[in-house]
Amino acid sequence: MKKAIVLSSGGVDSTVCLSMAVKKFGKDNVASTSIFYGQKHRKELDCAKAVAEYYGIPHYEFDVSSILRFSNCSLLANSTQQIVHKSYNQQIAENGTGKVSTYVPFRNGLMLSICASLAQSIYENDDVVIYIGAHADDAAGNAYADCSEEFVNTISDAIAIGTYEQVRVEAPFAGVSKAEVVRKGLELEAPFHLTWSCYEGGAKPCGTCATCIDRARAFNVNHAKDPTI
């Protein structure tokens, strides 16, 4: 029986991936994983757990904050930087390098490696697909290099080699926009009310950080109301 592990951030993209995985494989064959890497808040981790409970699947949380304690990324609690409240496009235009301030060093590579190890531990004799919610908007302008199709395909090949061809990575939205992700989630009746995207950890989304801007645009394109607002 084929299994699936969904790398869950508690946000829109990974929650839609989880909805897809449950529909395709059945909840008894799906698990989710979230990672604490030293974030300024745990809101997204709590949401990832709530989404897993909604679907009735096992959820695993790991702590890799000791690895990323040396980074000064603005998302991290030990950072001297403040989160930038501008769109990704505006940040890229201003910095001229592509990489945005909320890029966490090789985060997706680290997380996918953890998922691969978990897959071979809990599903030792099964073929496993790891779902990641990276989409084209994340990779656009090289904002997040570890969200690109090239990155996902390459690390999938490496993971397959290192797991005797039992584990692979899929990014079903790598070639489409966040609006398409939301559209798919609406079709699947994904529990968007349980998700969190904002880089800040307040009681309500700030509405002005890059991921809030992207999320609002995606719901607006679909003429849908964001249930978290």
Image: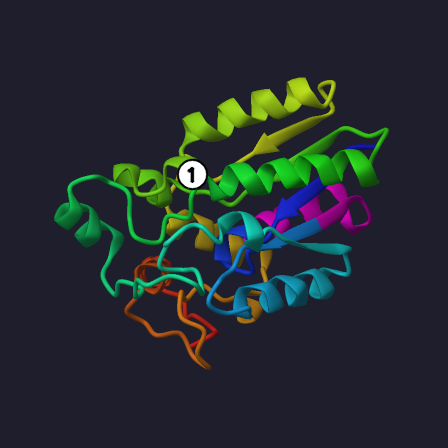
Would you say residue 3 is visible in this rendering? Answer: no
Q: Is residue 40 magenta?
A: no
Query: What x and y, as percent, mark residue 110?
Result: 55, 40
Question: Is 103 in front, or is 3?
Answer: 103
The residue drawn where x is 68% and y is 51% is 32
Assign a secondary structure to mark 1.
Answer: helix
Judging from the image, the colouring scheme is rainbow
Q: Residue furthest front?
A: 70
The residue drawn where x is 30% and y is 43% is 143
On the image, numbered disc 1 is attached to which residue? Answer: 147
Give the total number of marks visible in the rendering. Answer: 1
Q: Is residue 19 magenta?
A: yes
Examine the rendered structure and indicate whether residue 50 appears above or below residue 120. below
Query: What x and y, as percent, mark residue 148?
Result: 40, 33
The residue drawn where x is 25% and y is 65% is 85
Q: Which residues are magenta?
A: 16-31
Query: What x and y, as percent, mark residue 224?
Result: 40, 66
Left/right placement of residue 219 relative to residue 65 reads left
Left/right placement of residue 96 relative to residue 66 reads left
Q: Residue furthest right?
A: 125
Residue type, numbered disc 1: Cys
Question: Is 223 in front, or is 165?
Answer: 165
Q: Is the magenta region chiefly helix, strand or loop? A: helix
Left/right placement of residue 32 relative to residue 219 reads right
Would you say residue 114 is visible in this rendering? Answer: yes
Q: Residue furthest bottom?
A: 203
